[in-house]
Amino acid sequence: MSDRMELEVSMKDKLRTLVREALERCFADGSLASGEIPAIVIEQPANADHGDFACTVAMGMAKIERKAPRMVAETLVKHIEDREGLCSAIDIAGPGFINFRIGTEAWCRTLGAIEAAGARFGCSTAGEGRKVQVEFVSANPTGPLHIGHGRGAAIGDTICRLLDATGWDVTREFYYNDAGAQIANLALSVQSRCLGIEPGDPRWPADGYQGDYIMDVARSYLARETVDAGDQHVTAVGDPNDLDAIRRFAVAYLRREQDQDLLAFDVHFDVYSLESNLYTEGRVDAVIRQLVESGHTYEQDGALWLRTTDFGDDKDRVMRKSDGSYTYFVPDIAYHLAKWERGFTHVINEQGADHHSTVTRVRAGLQALSVGIPQGWPDYVLHQMVTVMRGGEEVKISKRAGSYVTLRDMIDEVGRDATRFFFLMRKPDSQLVFDIDLAKQQTLENPVYYVQYAHARICSIFENAADKGFAVPCLADAPLARLGTAEEMEIVKLLASYPEVVEGSALSFEPHRVAYYLQELAGAFHSFYNRNRVITEEGDLTAARLFLLACAARVLNNGLTLLGVSAPEKM
């Protein structure tokens, strides 16, 4: 794959190139002797008075060069050739910091890059077309999706969007079980409803599901309805005594409901995988045989154990219990081996924090197979719980689900945009308080409204400008030299950093970085708008500011799209 488009190379990358080329010149003429180019780190100084960016490479090279860091910095700076005219000044500070001040014209070149790339601004080919599989949601079809599933759906889907935007070949996968104890309880619950037995009746299953949705499934089954889900097609038999038929129909019915909720959340999947297939295809038994042959298992107390302590676990784990059944992490090992065999050398699992204990066990099992799977594979993103608040009190109950708040409850009450943004605006491993009252507010205190209103406000400015005879110019007709106020340059600098934010978010699997960025960009726009007139008596200044805001609107739109949130033109 080719490198990233030149117009989208970040300012940090350009400065790294300047420093690297200067070091090569220093080595070539002998002014520096080590001949080894170290890692070149370009950072933003904590104090803006020190410049736009700083480099500490001279201090890292001082020992090997046997020179004071400041002397190394002075030598390096003398060899910098800024052919693009990026810097208005390059200073040396303290013991050897190299500080770069970027010129206004260089900053404003970003605006041309935004115009050229349009909806693709921020995208790159960093992934080089490599395959990556992202597994997320993966909810067993025993009831409606809850808010934890919703947070996982928002995070997983946005990770997919970020990876896609940075040049990866992404496969979205949903893994679930259509058998086992939970599904058996589901079937018994639906059967009981079919027979007129209600919760509270002594005949109700001890671990039965009690939400209103069980009655909905029972009615549809008795009516012999046909259900089409993403990977299921089932027509109900209608016989309340056929428990297996009830199970098949209930699984399909609830998978369809999950699909409908996810569609309303703008989430889709490419592949659905069934845990039961791992057994019918013999994959679980095959993995057990491989692990035994590897020498990492032993028998004790009638059970088969995996020596996971060989791979960093705190104690060994049972794989096959004394009754012959497998523990839950064994099919997970088989499933992940199948992922590897399907060619996915990059796999990300987005799951709830309650899966934390499975991470070490699955990785240990995969290492024990000795099939070339690297340590630390697959990657995991574990999200913390969500607490829903309304009127200062926690909301715990949904009438339909019976014992928890559903994703559909949230979408219906506050809308898809607010639900997704709120789920995404905190780091996944941070607990999230979802304030329904705040999410419904149409004020700047509401984070998603704050960002969307910035986009809508810019669109409104364009309408007002058109009424006064001003069109949004193209780059060729925008006198960008007129830009230069602190508020204008804050917007420009933020726009220039967007590609780096996207790539960093993709590499770290942290969608919240984009949400933070959008709030910062919206804040910069609101600050600009409160202090500056866009439509002025000076036509060239008006044109420059309209072009700047067009670029800001473009990036707000691009960022919101990555989060699966709309960018309204009116609010």
Image (cartoon, helix red, strand yellow):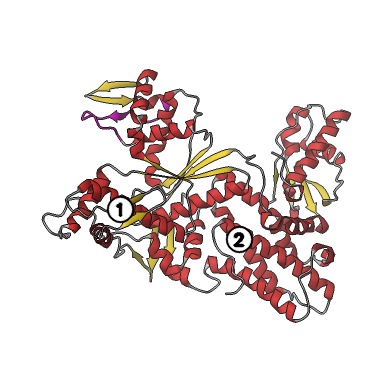
Give SS at disc 2: helix
- Tell me: 246 left or right of 522: left
Q: Residue at x 67, y 47 (%)?
A: 124
Where's residue 67, x and y in %?
79, 31
Q: Residue at x 30, y 60 (%)?
A: 401
Q: Which residue is mark 2?
A: 518
Q: Does the magenta run of residues contain 323?
A: yes
- Tell me: 54 left or right of 349: right
Asked if residue 361 can be seen in this view, the reply is: no
Q: Compared to 342, does 520 lie above or below?
A: below
How far apart, in angstroms, are the residues tagged by discs 1 and 2?
47 Å
Q: Compared to 437, does 343 lie above or below?
A: above
**Quadrant of image for the C terminus:** bottom right
Where's residue 470, x and y in %?
78, 76
**Depth check, front residue: 372 or 497:** 372
Q: Earlier in the sequence, mark 1 or mark 2?
A: 1
Outermost residue, right side: 29
**Depth check, front residue: 449 or 60:** 449
Q: Residue at x 49, y 73 (%)?
A: 441
Looking at the rendered structure, the kind of residue marked 1 is Thr
Give SS at disc 1: strand
Q: Which residue is mark 1?
A: 235
Q: Main secondary structure of the magenta part?
A: loop
How many other residues sit within 10 Å of disc 1, few (<14), some (14-19) or many (≥20)? Answer: some
Where's residue 567, x and y in %?
59, 66
Asked if residue 366 can be seen in this view, the reply is: yes
